[in-house]
Amino acid sequence: MPRISVVIPAYNGVSRYLEQAIRSVLAQTVKDFELIVVDDASTDDTARLVLRFPSARYYKRPTNGGQAVARNDGARLAKGEFLAFLDQDDLWEPTFLEETSAVLNAHPETALVHCDGYQVNERNEILEYDAAMKHANSITQMLRGGHDMATSGSLFRKSCFDAVDGYDESLPVWEDIDLAIRLYQRFRIVHLPKPLYRHRLYGRNASRDIPSERALLGRRYFLEKHGPACRPGTPEARALARDWAQYYSDLGKALLQAGQTKEARRALWQAVRHDPTNHTVFLRLLRSFFQG
């Protein structure tokens, strides 16, 4: 039985660097692992690409379920004591599994070890160092103790992953943050301050500042799910108010772009109500009255 199970969720991976991700797994200095590629109902030749690697187990979902669903499917297939997920457009440094598994081996009470990484461009050129401890005044950080665990930069103890029921499949966004919060509430998490993975960034146009309806729905679900943990009068409650203000501000921005001016104003009023000190939102609200 392998010690480590590696899961790569894939969707149309032929043009999205899947082969590079697989090769970065096979190049690991530790060889006691299994590789599972979960094809999330791709419409390209992802199957043919994966089957070129005899050591990879290939599983194809009948319908597209999204990242959280594909990762959970891979976890159910996994046989290892430890569990790692690598996104198809990310890469591991050769010692990722060796160094992270050494931490879990040395600390049996630890549920998760996560490391720093690099942000790289589409040509795998380093853009910046990404430190994995962040202490922003947001519940997305505060409720997980600052552990900004990247999916591709983490190694789980599978029994702990299973104990919290894995990823929340209802979340289309922030499912990794939600998982980190639930693990942090019950187990020990360790940060390894070494850059052992690479996260690929893509060039995007200016419309990236307008969140999608799917992203907004996911954020609302996340805030409603974790809001009750933020007791009134605490720093977490103040952070929650700011996060709700940001949500309503982004909702208002999206509604303004869609020409739904009255609905946008209602959302922006909610943002001001949650955080009256946010002058940017107040100005956006005022500008909305000149947009029809």
Image (tube, rainbow, N blue to C red):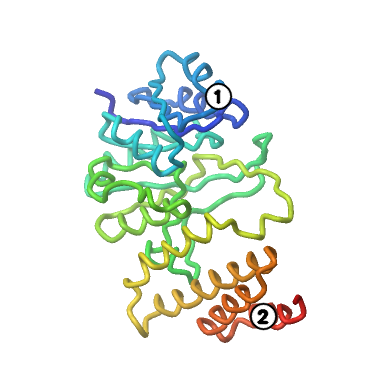
Instruction: Give the Cα distance between marks 2 and 1.
Output: 47 Å
Q: Is residue 267 left or right of residue 258?
A: left
Give the labeled residue for mark 1. 19
Residue where numbered disc 2 is placed: 285
Residue 24 location in percent, x, y? 51, 27
Q: Quadrant of the C terminus?
A: bottom right
Q: Earlier in the sequence, mark 2 or mark 1?
A: 1
> In the image, is residue 177 above or below residue 63?
below
* Residue 31: x %, y % from top left: 37, 22
Q: Compared to 76, does 53 lie above or below?
A: above
Q: State which quadrant residue 124 falls in.
A: top right
Residue 217 image offset from top left, x and y in percent: 48, 60
Crowding at mark 2 (Cα within 10 Å: few <14, some 14-19, many 20+): many
Is label 1 in a helix, a strand or a loop? helix
Q: Quadrant of the N terminus?
A: top left
| Relative side of 90 to 167, left or right | right
Kind of residue at badge 1: Glu
